[in-house]
Image: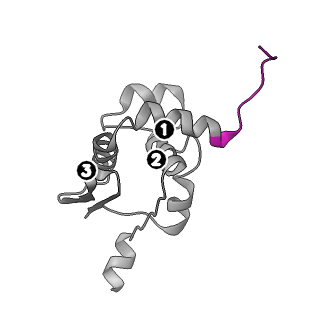
């Protein structure tokens, strides 16, 4: 075996995807939890071939502005913690956006988000 090295981010994300996204139902679970954390009262799921060919999760949660949408795909992105002690106060489903990063590393992925301001203008 060769010497120890740091994995490229893409490979690390794909390995994490294997831990987070074991099957299409796990993707729906993760995205559904994100929807609930965003205050959604309605979540719609569409899929083809059991989620292997196509999957869409749409909700009426609070949405993200363009900067937040880009940032949520960065490693260790979070809106809920600033320091380690904050982990004791998390009362929602998740505190890192690891699932989105992992999911996007192994599938063709499109993120569409409307913030409350954009919805009001429409």
Choose the circle earlier in sequence order: 2 or 3. 3
Identify the residue under disc 3: 50
Identify the residue under disc 1: 17
Identify the residue under disc 2: 103
Quarter of the figure that contains the N terminus: top right
Q: Nearer the viewer, mark 2 or mark 3?
A: 3
Q: Could you say where residue 81 lies in the image, as x and y percent from the top left? A: 48, 37
Kindly state the secondary structure of the residue where label 1 is placed: helix
Between residues 63 and 102, which one lies in front from this camera angle?
102
Say left or right for 110 vs 51: right
Q: Could you say where residue 58 lies in the image, as x and y percent from the top left? A: 28, 63
Mark 1 surroundings within 10 Å by alpha-carbon count, few (fewer than 14), some (14 through 19), many (20 or more) = many
Instruction: Tell me where residue 45 sits by quadrant.
Output: bottom left
Residue lying furthest right in this view? 3
Q: Could you say where residue 30 lies in the image, as x and y percent from the top left? A: 33, 43
Between residues 29 and 97, which one lies in front from this camera angle?
29
Choose the circle earlier in sequence order: 2 or 1. 1
Kindly state the secondary structure of the residue where label 3 is placed: helix
The span from disc 1 to disc 3 (Cα, nearest Å) is 18 Å
Instruction: Tell me where residue 56 sits by quadrant.
Output: bottom left
Magenta includes 5?
yes
Q: Nearer the viewer, mark 1 or mark 3?
A: 3
Q: Is residue 54 above or below residue 3?
A: below
The span from disc 2 to disc 1 (Cα, nearest Å) is 6 Å
Residue lying furthest bottom in this view? 122
């Amino acid at each position: 075996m060769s010497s120890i090295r740091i994995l490229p981010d893409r490979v690390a994300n794909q390995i994490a995807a294997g831990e987070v996204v074991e099957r299409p139902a796990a993707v729906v679970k993760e995205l559904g939890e994100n929807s609930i954390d965003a205050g959604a009262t309605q979540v719609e799921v569409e899929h083809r071939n059991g989620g292997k060919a196509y999957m869409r999760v749409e909700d009426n949660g609070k949405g993200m502005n363009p900067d937040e949408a880009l940032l949520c795909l960065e490693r260790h992105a979070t809106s809920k913690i600033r320091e380690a002690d904050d982990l004791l106060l998390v009362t929602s489903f998740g505190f890192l956006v690891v699932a989105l990063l992992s999911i996007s590393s192994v599938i063709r992925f499109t993120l569409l988000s409307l913030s409350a301001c954009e919805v009001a203008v429409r």
